[in-house]
Amino acid sequence: MSAVEKRSVTIRGHRTSYSLEKSFHDDLVAIATARTLTLAALVAEIDATRPRDTNLSSALRLHVLEWAKRGAGS
């Protein structure tokens, strides 16, 4: 498994960071591309809908998992 990498993004006018393994990040980029969103827009959408007791990195991983379970958007 790949090492966790910290990444930064600007959402709603402020910088935030999250930590993901490369495979999760690659899938997040693929989801954004499939939905014709920027990565920042997708992260902002996930951030806005996540439970407040869930950190952003976990919410991003769960979003990728749900997307994969749905058959990569089919």
Image (tube, helix red, strand yellow):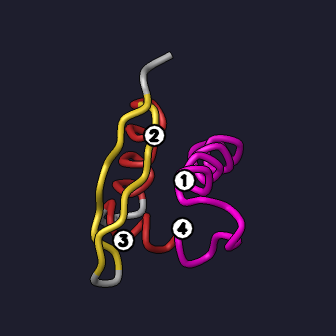
Q: CA distance from mark 3 to mark 4?
A: 9 Å
- Residue under pointer 3: 41
Instruction: Indicate the secondary structure of the residue bearing disc 3.
Output: helix
Dot placed on the residue nearer the N-terminal end, 1 or 2:
2
* Residue under numbered circle 1: 60
Q: Is residue 42 above or below residue 24?
A: below
Q: Is 19 positioned to the left or the right of 10 in the image? A: right
Count the marks: how many? 4
Q: Earlier in the sequence, mark 1 or mark 4?
A: 4
1 and 4 marks in contact (CB < 8 Å): yes
Which comes sooner in the sequence, label 3 or label 2?
A: 2
Looking at the rendered structure, the kind of residue marked 4 is Ile
Q: Earlier in the sequence, mark 1 or mark 3?
A: 3
- In three-dimensional space, the C-alpha distance between marks 1 and 2, rounded to whole angstroms, equals 8 Å
Residue type for callout 3 = Ala
Residue that carries the numbered disc 2 in the rendered image: 20
Residue extent of the magenta highlight: 47-74
Q: Are marks 3 and 4 in contact (CB under 8 Å)?
A: no
Task: Judge from the rendering whether residue 48 lies leftward or rightward of residue 29; answer left or right.
Answer: right
Q: Is residue 29 magenta?
A: no
Q: What is the C-alpha distance between the residues marked 1 and 3? A: 13 Å
* Residue mark closest to the camera, 2 vs 4: 2
Q: Quadrant of residue 13?
A: bottom left
Name the image quarter holding residue 51: bottom right
The residue that mark 4 highlights is 46
Looking at the image, is mark 1 or mark 3 nearer the viewer? 1
List the single residue furthest toward the bottom.
Answer: 13
